[in-house]
């Protein structure tokens, strides 16, 4: 696709988001399984359900545009997911590995926050008010997930990882 207009860029960004979310549908169950902390596991499982809704919202936007959401691979998310896989393959103390999972997940969330914020802005500028509302709804959920991950890290997972290091 040629980027000759903001509309073209908007559709490209939507396709990128669609690919990113589809990749996360595969990655989140693996992250949940790798988490030692029950609270972290629950956070990943909850976000998996939200991610399914994110894909549904994007599909709805594509239907309204009479476009398909396929045809583009989000290489940014592919790299972030690959980094997360590498973390899950590491050996080590459970608390440290959970801290690593949070770090990987927050990189993903920050990527999504940037992408959804930009794409929502494009939708607003182009007059797609319903799409902008749906994208904002997803952006709000991504921001809430990021806050939840920070809370889990600060409420004990990172402290437990520090304690492991102090024992060594």
Image (cartoon, rainbow, N blue to C red):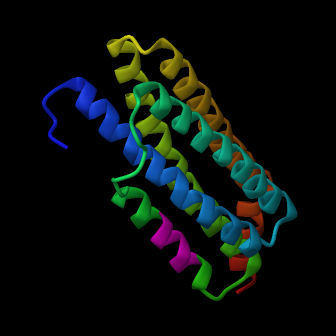
Q: Where, by quadrant of the figure, is residue 50 drawn?
A: top right
Of residues 76 and 153, which is closer to you in this image? 76
**Spot occupied by residue 109 in the image (x, y as percentages of width and height):** 54, 47
Q: Residue at x 49, y 20 (%)?
A: 132
Q: Where, by quadrant of the figure, is residue 140 drawn?
A: top right
Q: Where, by quadrant of the figure, is residue 30 drawn?
A: bottom right
**Spot occupied by residue 65 in the image (x, y as percentages of width and height):** 41, 27
Q: Residue at x 45, y 63 (%)?
A: 80
Is residue 154 among the parts visible in the rendering? no
Image quarter hosting the N terminus: top left
Please give left or right for residue 146 compared with residue 8 in the image: right
Q: Residue at x 46, y 72 (%)?
A: 82
**Spot occupied by residue 116 in the image (x, y as percentages of width and height):** 46, 34
Q: Residue at x 47, y 47 (%)?
A: 18
Give the residues drawn in magenta, as a range: 81-87
Is residue 15 among the parts visible in the rendering? yes
63 part of magenta stretch: no
Q: What secondary structure predominates along the stretch shown in magenta?
A: helix
Please give left or right for residue 106 compared with residue 15 in the image: right
């Amino acid at each position: 696709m040629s980027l000759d207009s903001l509309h073209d860029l908007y559709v490209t960004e939507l396709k990128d988001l669609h690919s990113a979310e589809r990749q996360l549908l595969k990655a989140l169950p693996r992250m949940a399984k790798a988490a030692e902390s029950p609270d972290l596991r629950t956070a990943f499982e909850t976000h998996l359900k939200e991610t399914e809704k994110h894909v549904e919202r994007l599909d709805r936007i594509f239907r309204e545009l009479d476009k398909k959401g396929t045809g583009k691979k989000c290489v940014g998310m592919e790299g972030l997911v690959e980094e997360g896989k590498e973390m899950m393959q590491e050996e080590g103390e459970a608390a440290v590995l959970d801290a690593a999972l949070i770090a990987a997940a927050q990189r993903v969330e920050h990527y999504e926050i940037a992408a959804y914020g930009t794409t929502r802005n494009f939708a607003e500028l182009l007059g797609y008010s319903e799409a902008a509302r749906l994208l904002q709804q997803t952006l709000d959920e991504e921001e809430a997930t990021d806050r939840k991950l920070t809370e889990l890290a600060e409420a004990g997972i990172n402290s437990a990882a520090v304690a492991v290091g102090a024992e060594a």
